[in-house]
Image (cartoon, helix red, strand yellow):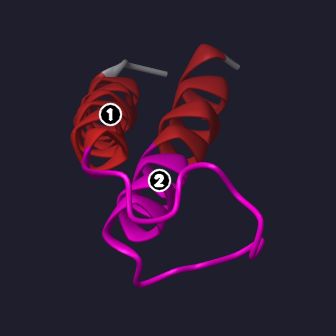
């Protein structure tokens, strides 16, 4: 159960990080009135969350059943 939960949370965190990077860079301007669009700081926060999510996902995959 920990393995599946870790993989799901890691995948969601990685996806969220990619979305934040897209909004911060202006490539994903949704919603239009978001305070995150074209704000460089959100590229960095997104990268940090993406790396955390990826690490969580990979660690969860290594947990023995």
Q: Viewed as shown, does residue 48 lie left or right of 11? A: left
Check contact, mark 1 vs mark 2: CB within 8 A.
yes
Name the image quarter holding the N terminus: top right
Q: Earlier in the sequence, mark 1 or mark 2?
A: 2
Frontmost residue, 22 versus 15: 22
Counting from the top left corner in percent of width and height, residue 14 is at 43, 48
SS for dot 2: helix
Image: magenta residue range: 14-40
**In this rendering, is residue 2 above or below 54?**
above
Frontmost residue, 41 versus 16: 41
Q: Viewed as shown, does residue 8 lie left or right of 46? A: right
- Report the residue at 51% width, 39% height from top: 13
Characterize the local packing of mark 2: few (<14), some (14-19) or many (20 or more) Cα atoms within 10 angstroms. Answer: many
**In this rendering, is residue 2 above or below 4?**
above
- Report the residue at 27% width, 36% height from top: 58
Q: Is 50 included in the stretch rendered in magenta?
A: no
Frontmost residue, 22 versus 63: 22
Q: How many marks?
A: 2
Counting from the top left corner in percent of width and height, residue 42 is at 37, 44
Judging by the rendered image, the residue that carries numbered circle 2 is 20
Judging by the rendered image, the residue that carries numbered circle 1 is 45
SS for dot 1: helix
Counting from the top left corner in percent of width and height, residue 55 is at 24, 30
Q: Tell me how far mark 1 sits from mark 2, CA to CA.
A: 7 Å
- Report the residue at 24% width, 44% height from top: 47
Q: Viewed as shown, does residue 9 lie left or right of 44? A: right
**In this rendering, is residue 2 above or below 32?**
above
Characterize the local packing of mark 1: few (<14), some (14-19) or many (20 or more) Cα atoms within 10 angstroms. Answer: some
What numbered label is drawn on residue 35? Answer: none
- Report the residue at 60% width, 46% height from top: 12
Q: Is 33 included in the stretch rendered in magenta?
A: yes
Counting from the top left corner in percent of width and height, residue 7 is at 52, 38
């Amino acid at each position: 159960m920990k393995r599946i939960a870790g993989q799901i949370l890691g995948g969601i965190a990685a996806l969220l990080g990619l979305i934040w990077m897209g909004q911060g860079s202006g490539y994903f301007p949704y919603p239009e009135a978001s305070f995150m669009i074209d704000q460089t700081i959100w590229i960095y926060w997104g990268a940090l969350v993406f790396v955390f999510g990826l690490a969580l996902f990979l660690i969860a995959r290594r947990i023995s059943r």
